[in-house]
Image: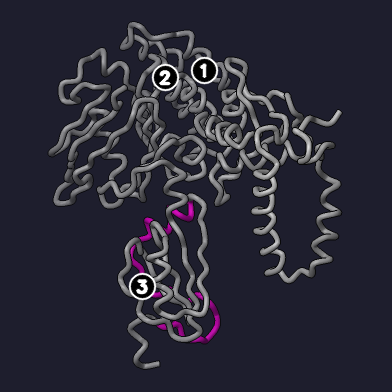
Amino acid sequence: MGFHVDTASRLPIYQQLVDQIREAVARGDLQPEEKLPSVRQLSGELVVNPNTIARAFLELERAGILVSRAGRGMYVAHPGTDLSKAARNRRLAESLDRWLTEAVHLGFAADEVVELVTRRVADFQWNADGAKGKGKTQP
Amino acid sequence: MTDAIVTDRLTKHYGERKVVDNLSLHVARGTVYALLGRNGAGKSTTLKMLAGMVHPDAGTMQLLGEDASTLSPPTRGRIAYLAEGHPLIDWMTIGQLVTFTRAFYPAADGKLVEQILDHFGLPLKAKINRLSKGERAQVSLALAIMPDPELLILDDPTLGLDTNVRRDFLESMIQIIQRRGRTILFSSHILGDVERIADRIGIMMDGVLRVDCPVEHFKSSVRKVVVEFGRLPPVFPKCDGLIGDWQVKTRCELVFVGFGPRQRAAIEALEPVRIDVAELNLEDAFIEYTRGPRRSLPLFTGETDHVQSAGDQGTA
């Protein structure tokens, strides 16, 4: 996985990594059970303080996107296994509302937004069972 | 464990000028701490005092738990100092300089220094006075970490290096950081580098330590707020956290440290048309923070519009 760091960004470096890993998992570039590079390795490659990498991993672990296995490193978690359906609905609705607010202010019409979503959906990897099941991975 | 560096009300004058003013600095063991500030803010003098090159006029320092004024040679040997500009003994070869320096550190690891020189592609036979700036920096870093120091004090170590050599140098610093428990205090003007490797920053202004916090904390505290009035802006009242304000035509541009509901209310009380709050990257946050008191922006555009300062308002 090629991650990158932009020091001209307003986002803190750990947040940039969190965003990139989240996106890589969502797009299927990182698969469940896949092992991530170690803190040491990423720190060397990206030329970033190891504490910053560790912080990004910790945030992702808290969010249920990565799991740490003692002594073995960080792995991509199975999607959505930890949260109840209601909690997952709530979380998605919250970020959707923020996004829709932005779309309204940018002057989009409702059908344009739906069309845009439909087009972008194809770029991501989806859980076959959806939020109904207990979140097993696709084949 | 304890702090690697503790200073208490450290003060230094050069002539009449107080270059370091009651500096109380704590650097925890294992921390990478970047000391920032504009030229002449007192960074170098602070680092020189810590390295024992300059005597403070007042105040105390503790390094690795020992009083710096009576530092024992073994403890001194666990501290490395890289002076600004990487001064080295010019007439020696790299090999001679390694032998010479190693004599001061009986327990030093000669393999380590050879590995580093090899990594940088620096031959032992090369004469110091023939080296480029970047090579000098690499040699002085290699020599500094030869005794495997617990505390490194680096005075603007990447000053004058080209982008590629600077990146190499940062990679070496990351390797040092990865050796657990090493404490690094360094000064720099390159904020992108600072953000990559520092855990914490301190900002000195006129000898005073004004900021001392984690890097992200500083970045997320400074906000630039642009307030559009659609008319001549009123004189902006004093407000907590306001560190700079100036006006351009019908706009007020404000810089805050810590922007919350109280600051927003103070602005809204002036009945503006629009308020835009912008986050800043580290470099911009630093610039806004250290720029100091401003008058109205000078007129740089070719337009003939009159740019008014607060004092002009009566004659508009």
Q: Quadrant of the C terminus of chain A?
A: top right
Quick check: B220 above or below B297?
Answer: above
Position of residue A56 in the picture relative to residue A82 (left or right): left
What are the residue bounds of the magenta stretch? B283-308
- The residue that mark 1 highlights is B116
- Respond whether the residues carrying marks 2 and 3 are from the same subunit: yes
Marks 2 and 1 in Cβ contact (< 8 Å): yes
Q: Chain of mark 2?
A: B
The Cα–Cα distance between marks 2 and 1, rounded to whole angstroms, is 9 Å
- The residue that mark 3 highlights is B295
Q: Chain of mark 3?
A: B
Residue B287 included in the magenta stretch of the image: yes
Quick check: B114 above or below B159?
Answer: above
The Cα–Cα distance between marks 3 and 1, rounded to whole angstroms, is 50 Å
Magenta stretch, overall SS: loop
Residue lying at 61% horizontally and 38% vertically, measured from the top left: A17
Locate residue B225, reporting x and y percent: 47, 66
Residue B95: quadrant of the picture? top left
Q: Nearer the viewer, residue A31 or B19?
A: A31
- The residue that mark 2 highlights is B145
Quick check: B58 above or below A121?
Answer: above
Residue B214, label in figure: none
Q: Residues within 10 Å of mark 3 (few under 14, many from 20)?
A: few
